[in-house]
Amino acid sequence: MDSEELAGRLAAGGFTLVEEPADADTVLVNTCGFIDAAKKDSIDQILAAADLKATQGVRHVVAVGCLAERYGAELAAELPEADAVLGFDDYPEIARRLRQLAAGVALGAHQPRDRRGLLPISPVARQRAFEDAGLPSPAYRQVIRRRLDDGPSAALKIASGCDRRCAFCAIPAFRGAYRSKPPAQVVAEARWLVDRGVREVLLVSENSTSYGKDLPGVHPAQLLAELSHVAGLEWIRMTYLQPAELRPALIDAICGTEHVVPYFDLPFQHASARVLRRMRRFGDAESFLELLASIRSRNPAAGIRTNVIVGFPGETESELEELGEFLAAAHLDAIGVFGYSNEEGTEGYSLDGQLDANEIAGRVEWVASLADELMAQRAEDRVGETVPILIESQAIGRAALQGPEDGIVRIEYAGNGLSQSKRRLPSPGSVVSGKVKASDGVDLVAELR
């Protein structure tokens, strides 16, 4: 979404966007700074773009995004291949910044700061603080965005920042305190997306269950209700629901609001109570299983995914086994497995009990292998179910129970003598109904009639 905002601001500022980096005068690299693997990939992308200066006539390479925000001047010093390193505060003026760069003006590297202190601790005081500081008004403004693909699904940011202090996470320091996008603005952007062919919006933020905490009288269920009335919007999917904050009213809204898909993205992160406390999170295997039972009592067919972190400092082998036992009992549709990344500026960075990289890699391999088996079993359990499917391209789609990274549905047709080539295939963006007849790993095979 940040890339699409930057693209929109550049287009509005008179820049022409091109498909291939080699055809550009200036290349912006939108970096990620969450974990080591993402940092390395971002640096590799900057270096690859810099190579184009020697071979293809690209004049400037500019680093933006989370890595640039988090490290700023340090990144600029370590990576002189980037002609500028810009932070989030540069986004509203990105077109002017690039014009300055083209005119030969040296842009000072972004100076990082802990953004958590820029807004009041009290969420309800944050909107006034923005106004007092002369920052952009939270009221409705024209959508500044340009789509970078033509698929039927698109992410829609509903908030930025996070007030939680998970010991493994650096995001609050460089994203700042939690701030919700007002409902009218979210709805306006959803309409804008629908006008450009989108039929599914994925509501994203660092913690979607916190939505509205800084807006008096606003709560997530209300936002879902307002979005459900956007004409042409088929599916609304919430992502990143903090398990400790998921209340019955929101479960009811997700399971019972028209056009909202019964899908729960619940990053449990672990199942051991002791490990979770060290992570500065809440819960345990028993409470998580109770939450899953509560969801399934409302909709037995709900899709549920999670992410888990293995190798957190002090994690014992018995606690790792406890995590495996929980995953086996949870019957989840999708499981993301990540090895602990020791990030500077986080509480976890200085905890005792640090595990070496080889040990973490071995634990990741074991849990990931188990997760693959469990997800395949869960997909097989879906055989016989009738599911709504969003068509993405030709005979490929996704069921309501599947997020964009959770697998696909391959579509077949009940026989009436016509071959698939002679049938009129559903168009991308349409929602059809299919009966699951087989599974292949996490993927489903469904038959339309």
Image (cartoon, rainbow, N blue to C red):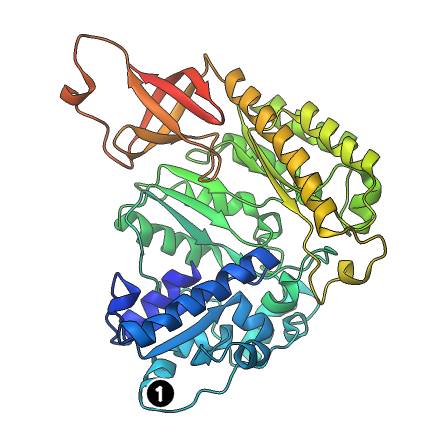
Q: Quadrant of residue 421?
A: top left
- Give 354 or 121, whichever is nearer the viewer: 354
Tally of marks: 1
Is residue 2 rendered to the left or right of residue 327? left
Residue sitting nearer the eye, 36 or 175: 36
State the image coordinates of residue 230 (x, y, percent, origin top left).
Answer: 35, 44
* Residue 392: % across, % down: 31, 36
Camera sees residue 300: no
Q: In the image, what residue occupies the spot 42% across and 81% down?
A: 83
Label 1: which secondary element: helix
**Quadrant position of the N terminus in the picture:** bottom left
Callout 1: 10 Å neighbours few (<14), some, many (20+)? few
Residue 233 position, x and y percent, is 34, 41
In the image, residue 139 sits, relative to residue 270, either above or below, namely below
Residue at the far top in the pictured view: 416
Question: Does residue 232 appear to the left or right of 5 in the view shown?
Answer: left
The residue sitting at 23% across, 33% down in the picture is 427
Q: Give the residue type at disc 1.
A: Gln
Write down the residue under mark 1. 100
Q: Quadrant of residue 431?
A: top left
Between residue 181 and residue 75, name the one nearer to us.
Answer: 75
Above or below 141: residue 265: above
Residue visible at 59% across and 73% down in the picture: 71
